[in-house]
Image (cartoon, grey):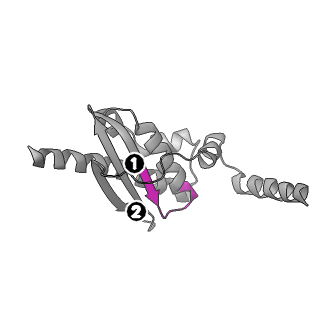
Amino acid sequence: MPAENDKLVQRLQESMFEGLSVNLKNEVLNLQNIGEIDNPGSYVSVTGVCGDTVEMCLNITDGRISDIKFMTDGCNFTIACASYVTRTAKGRTIEESLQIEPEDVDKYFGGLPEDHKHCAKLSVMTLKAAIDKYRSELKGIK
């Protein structure tokens, strides 16, 4: 029976990933930065046009994103995009992170399906909103 279960799991994974790029498959199988940060330097929640919401929190140390996490109620594409965006931003300066664009996410994944391109946009918008909130709160402290 275990061998039959393994074959069933393999067929399900193959059908689930059919037509998706290697990078997208790898991101889904190796998601990063899911969760929350205790006492983050910034926290935002952004809801996209599709109704998916991405929550993102981050800490910045010496002008670099030292930690970043996300949570979402979105689909697998939103989850993969948010994982990629947070993974890419982590360790970068604020300015470098602000250069990440939805087109970069789409390109990395080898072209998202047309009806899921907004997932990349939502993830990038959320990152930029978290950085903007961090900057505005920092100005309010001074």
Residue corresponding to mark 2:
48
The residue at the far front in this view is 38
What residue is rendered at 36% in x and 48% in y?
127
Q: Can I make out residue 6 in this image? A: yes
Q: Residues within 10 Å of mark 1 (few under 14, many from 20)?
A: many
Q: Nearer the viewer, residue 35 or 51?
A: 35
Mark 1 to mark 2 CA distance (whole Å): 11 Å
In the rendered image, the vertical position of residue 41 relative to residue 52, given as above or below: above
Residue 72, percent across and down?
Answer: 46, 60
Residue in view at x 65 percent, y 46 percent = 25
Residue 72 painted magenta: yes
Q: Which mark is residue 89?
A: none
Chain part drawn in magenta: 69-77
Instruction: Check contact, mark 1 vs mark 2: CB within 8 A.
Output: no
Q: Which residue is mark 1?
A: 124
Give how far across and how far down residue 1 sits, in percent.
91, 61
Q: Quadrant of the C terminus?
A: top left
- Tell me if 94 is positioned left or right of 68 in this view: left
